[in-house]
Image: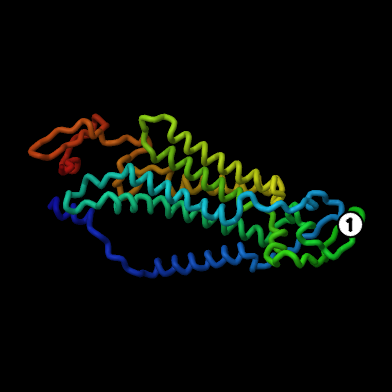
């Protein structure tokens, strides 16, 4: 009977292409196309923003990007590596599985990492779609708009210009269109989302270590990345300060909602599949040092004294 239950727990589900999977693939494809078209500037703005002739906030010179678009996109893969490494180092196969049927350490750690990575990816993509939509339907003139656009209008006084054509032929059409998509800052939103998600993940998922500075150091570096990336958008004259503030708030809210609702505060005990080395919010581990040998079998004593050792707590040597 125990063998049958063990096979049910450790059995491999056959991969089948079902209707829900097909729907997910279609949605993911549409979202990816939307993000790519938005980033390449192939989707025109719904509203064409005007400007005041005496507006000094859009007369700055374009300085380039300290953090390029490629860099910020590549930074999105850093949490993937960190989560996989964390789960690989801390993962232990389920104690309900026999030695013959238990998952390999590598495969088991990947499944644990994949669970959290799907939550991270969904939250990040959802936020980017919202940011891209706001840029198209609302947008704002960047601080270097006049320098980039060079409109065909002679401005005088405080007149408000709504009809103009950009005459700059030295820049690409994408770059000229992008000069009208300042609000909110996508760089700030993405960097803050990455930082808060990973800081939260490390705080909740990593158990207490002997070193007390490793995790705080990683968290500090993540926060410094978010602050540096956000502030660089202002110093590069790519965004107004309120654009960066709005993007940072959006990233903070998206990360918080992802961690609390999608990831359930990274509480492993609330998951159906409990195969992590830590099972509650206190990250209490099975005390491997308190083991005894009975008939060639190592029996681990749980940290909770009130728990009784049963056959399910037996780990084959």
Name the residue: 80% across, 66% down.
167
Name the residue: 35% across, 46% down.
87
> What is the x, y in percent for residue 92?
27, 44
Which type of secondary structure does the marked residue at label 1 adopt? loop
23 and 158: which is toward the camera: 158
**Taking 9 as reference, is 260 above or below it?**
above
Q: On the picture, is 172 further left or further right than 191? A: right
Instruction: Quarter of the image for the C terminus: give it.
Output: top left
**Taking 240 as reference, is 210 above or below it?**
above
Please name the residue that numbered disc 1 is placed on.
Answer: 159
Q: Quarter-wise, where is residue 264 in the image? A: top left
Q: Residue furthest front?
A: 170
> What is the x, y in percent for residue 261?
46, 48
112 and 209: which is toward the camera: 209
Q: How many marks?
A: 1
Name the residue: 61% across, 56% down.
131
Q: On the picture, is 55 further left or further right than 226? A: right
Q: Quarter-wise, where is residue 151 in the image? A: bottom right
> What is the x, y in percent for residue 20?
40, 66
Q: Residues within 10 Å of mark 1 (few under 14, many from 20)?
A: few
> What is the x, y in percent for residue 68?
61, 54
Q: On the picture, is 71 further left or further right than 142? A: left
Name the residue: 44% across, 42% down.
201
195 and 26: which is toward the camera: 195
**Taking 202 as reference, is 11 above or below it?**
below
């Amino acid at each position: 009977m125990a063998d049958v239950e063990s096979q049910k727990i450790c059995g491999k589900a056959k991969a089948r292409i079902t209707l829900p999977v097909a729907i997910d693939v279609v949605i993911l494809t549409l979202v990816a196309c939307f993000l790519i078209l938005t980033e390449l500037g192939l989707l025109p703005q719904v509203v064409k923003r005007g400007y005041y002739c005496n507006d000094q906030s859009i007369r700055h010179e374009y300085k380039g990007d300290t953090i390029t678009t490629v860099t910020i996109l590549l930074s999105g893969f850093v949490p993937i590596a960190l989560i996989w490494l964390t789960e690989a180092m801390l993962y232990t196969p389920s104690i309900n599985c026999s030695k013959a049927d238990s998952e390999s350490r590598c495969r088991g750690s990947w499944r644990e990492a994949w669970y959290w990575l799907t939550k991270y990816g969904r939250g990040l993509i959802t936020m980017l779609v919202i940011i891209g939509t706001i840029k198209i339907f609302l947008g704002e003139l960047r601080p270097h708009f006049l320098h980039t656009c060079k409109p065909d209008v002679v401005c005088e006084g405080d007149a408000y210009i709504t009809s103009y054509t950009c005459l700059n032929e030295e820049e690409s059409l994408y770059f000229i269109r992008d000069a009208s998509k300042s609000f909110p800052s996508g760089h700030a939103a993405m960097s803050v989302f990455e930082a808060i998600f990973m800081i939260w993940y490390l705080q909740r998922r990593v158990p207490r270590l002997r070193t007390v500075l490793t995790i705080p150091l990683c968290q500090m570096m993540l926060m410094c990345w978010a602050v540096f990336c956000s502030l660089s958008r202002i110093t590069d004259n790519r965004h107004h300060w309120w654009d960066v503030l709005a993007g940072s708030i959006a990233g903070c809210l998206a990360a918080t909602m992802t961690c609390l609702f999608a990831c359930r505060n990274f509480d492993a005990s609330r998951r159906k599949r409990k195969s992590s080395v830590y099972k509650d919010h206190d990250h209490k581990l099975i005390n491997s040092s308190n083991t005894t040998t009975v008939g060639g079998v190592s029996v681990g004593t749980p940290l909770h004294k009130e728990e009784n050792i049963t056959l399910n707590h037996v780990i084959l040597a």
